[in-house]
Amino acid sequence: MTSERLPRHSIGLAEVVQGAHPSHAAIAGLLLCLSFGSVGIAPSIVTLAWLALVTPSLVVIDLRLRRLPNVLVVPGLGAMLIDGGWAGVASGELAVNALVTTTIVTAVMLVLNLVGGLGMGDVKLSVVMTGCLSLVSPLLAVSALMLAFFLGGGYSAALLLRRRDQRRRRIAFGPLLLCAFWTVVVLNALTGIWRASVT
């Protein structure tokens, strides 16, 4: 989907923009619409909007280079903090459930990174996703991660069955994380539409 290969050295914003394809804008626009359809103007929309904008580039770069650049992932952590502060101001109290869920997921992902199961880019992206969805519902956040690991397991099994996998070969987990994330966002939007139609 990109017009040229991105370099293997540190990936900056200029390289991301240079490697982008015009279709990325259309995909990002669609994801933005899904974001607003899912949560409206409420805490978590800032992080959702950021993820919508960077998802096409993250998918392409991770598939090509097995990397999730900090320039695209780290600002999501800032967006997550903005949403968390917004939720606290709106409710008058700390979003404890979201904080606990995100902390637990962060710890689990760091352990998986230490044992060699995940890259740090996957860890950071998981934290952004969890921080975002847990403000809507901790159940949504956990569901997205479980779906991502289910997809990852299925993909790995398919590679093994086709004998194309090598023991030390890493799969690009970022696209699976994002696929699971947006699936949950879409289902949440559809659930909201269904509830509105029956009331």
Image (cartoon, rainbow, N blue to C red):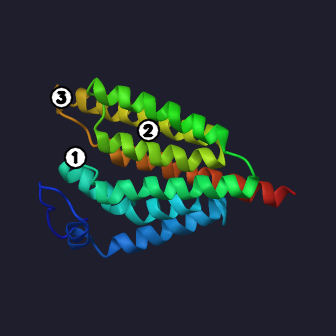
Circles 3 and 1, Cβ within 8 Å, touching? The answer is: no
Label 2: how many Cα within 10 Å (few below 14, some 14–19, many 20+): many
Q: Position of residue 108 (x, y in %)?
A: 43, 28
Q: Gap in Å between the C-alphas at discs 2 and 3?
A: 22 Å
* Secondary structure at numbered mark 2: helix
If the image is split into quadrants, where does the N terminus sit? bottom left
Query: Could you tell which of marks 2 and 1 lies nearer the N-terminus?
Result: 1
Location of residue 54 (image quadrant): bottom left
Q: CA distance from mark 2 to mark 1?
A: 16 Å
Q: Position of residue 123 (x, y in %)?
A: 37, 39
Instruction: Identify the residue position indicated by label 1 in the image.
Output: 66
Q: Position of residue 71 (x, y in %)?
A: 30, 59
Q: Which residue is mark 3?
A: 163
Q: Nearer the viewer, residue 155 or 192?
A: 192
Across and down, in percent, residue 45 comes to 58, 61
Left or right: 145 in relation to 113:
right
Amino acid marked by disc 2: Ala
Amino acid bearing label 1? Arg
Crowd rating for badge 1 (residues with CA inside 10 Å; few <14, some 14–19, many 20+):
some
Q: Is residue 135 above or below residue 109?
A: below
Instruction: Name the residue tied to disc 2.
Output: 148
Question: Of helix, strand and loop, which one carries label 3?
Answer: loop
